[in-house]
Image (cartoon, helix red, strand yellow):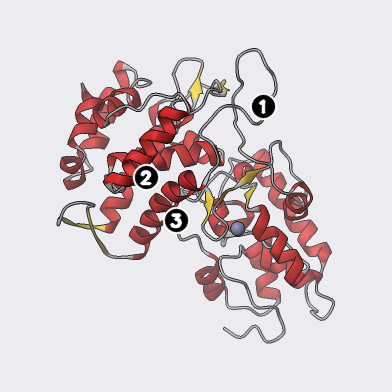
Amino acid sequence: MKFSNLLHPIFDETFPSWLTRCALNPKISGISERDIIEWKYEDDQKRRFLAPGLSMEFDFHESRGLALARELHLDVCIIEKIFRPTSTLLLSPNYRTAYCHLCIQSDVLQKRFPSWRKSWCYVTQPYCPIHWCLLSFIDGYPILDKQWNAYVRGNLGDYYQGRKGSSYTRRHMHGLPPNNIRAWLTLRVQMWINKIDRTRFCVLPGTDVLVDSIQLTSAVNFILRLFLVPRTDRNSSGVAKELLTAANPLIVHKVLDFKDRLDYGASNSVPYERMCALLLLGKIFNIFSPKEHSMFKKIVLDSEFDFPDSKTLGELSAGHVHAVEYSTLERQLGSLDVVSDYLSDFIEGVLC
Ligand SMILES: [Zn+2]
């Protein structure tokens, strides 16, 4: 598509980020800052009074953004093709405030505007693959102008949602140290998931078994969601929110059945929790080489956390599932098909 009178979208940029850049550019007519403010207002109202949906970043059907695109004579189908998400596991709009402070800095230096990335809105992308850092997270809602907010706040370090003991300080608590080993291992899993999303078939690590990528993605998504279920008044939390941190998991005071917990937890998770989910996934899917596996084990044990085997991890992962919900869990695991044979140790733990 010709963007002759507009700016060219940068790689991985979100739709509102690109339109905001266009609106702020004095050489571009047909769109103004006021249009963007109205769009944000409408989106905020929608989120407040209706169920949170795809929101500004990915709503290509009923958004003010789409109307703006039409006014600019842009082909809506092509807009959707460029800006649609490439992941099926999206963060909820209130959790799309994770960013790489170094990407933001370099944007401002080069283009005088911090562009938001689509991948920062995906559950499966807690690390910046360029700068090897865990994404920073802005806590609290509503966040006004998250782009510039992120630029001003810069590097916020690891963020934990829960509390540690009696201390109310919610930052910089005990977890896996932010070093290159942690980055390397998480990025190994992150890139493996990206590869599945891009190809039609995929070989299960360490085997010559070829599986349909859609099937593998659904297995990966199910297990990540299982790892990331929230703690509620009635249920304990998923392993990714508890196993590799000394912080007590945040309690969600809602009545959520098993399916609701699976949906809620993953989309309302912070980068540290998502990183833990990927590392544990890497372990049960044998994504790590023997050397990487021992590196992982070492950083976990050095940080004084347990390092369970796959079967125990399965047992721990099912700890929050009530007896009445058990058949749903069994059905979900049964639908993993060939992948379920591959994960037999883990699944044996879940179902024991
Ligand atoms: Zn970066």
The residue under label 2 is: 221
Q: Position of residue 126 (x, y in %)?
A: 52, 47
Where's ligand 1: which quadrant? bottom right
| Image quadrant occupied by the N terminus | bottom right
Residue mark closest to the camera, 3 vs 1: 1
Q: Position of residue 170 (x, y in %)?
A: 67, 27
Q: Is residue 222 visible?
A: no
Amino acid type assigned to the residue bearing label 2 in the image: Asn
| Image quadrant occupied by the C terminus | top left
Question: What whole-number distance in Å separates the C-alpha atoms at marks 1 and 2?
Answer: 28 Å
Between 6 and 207, the residue placed more toward the observer is 207
User: For residue 21, what is the image quadrant?
Assistant: bottom right
Vertical relation: 224 (above or below) 63: above
Residue occupying the point 47% across, 43% down = 182
Q: Which mark is residue 170?
A: 1
Amino acid type assigned to the residue bearing label 3 in the image: Ser
Residue occupying the point 21% across, 45% down = 339
Q: How many marks?
A: 3
Residue neighbourhood size for the residue with mark 2, other residues' Cα within 10 Å, grouped as few (<14), some (14–19), many (≥20): some
Residue neighbourhood size for the residue with mark 3, other residues' Cα within 10 Å, grouped as few (<14), some (14–19), many (≥20): some
Question: What whole-number distance in Å separates the C-alpha atoms at marks 2 and 3?
Answer: 10 Å
The residue under label 3 is: 87
User: For residue 52, what is the image quadrant?
Assistant: top right
Residue mark closest to the camera, 1 vs 2: 1
Vertical relation: 235 (above or below) 118: above
Q: Secondary structure at mark 2?
A: helix
- Give the mark, 1 or 2, whose residue is nearer the N terminus: 1
Q: Secondary structure at mark 3?
A: loop
Between 33 and 145, the residue placed more toward the observer is 145
Q: Is residue 338 visible?
A: yes
Question: What whole-number distance in Å separates the C-alpha atoms at marks 3 and 1?
Answer: 30 Å
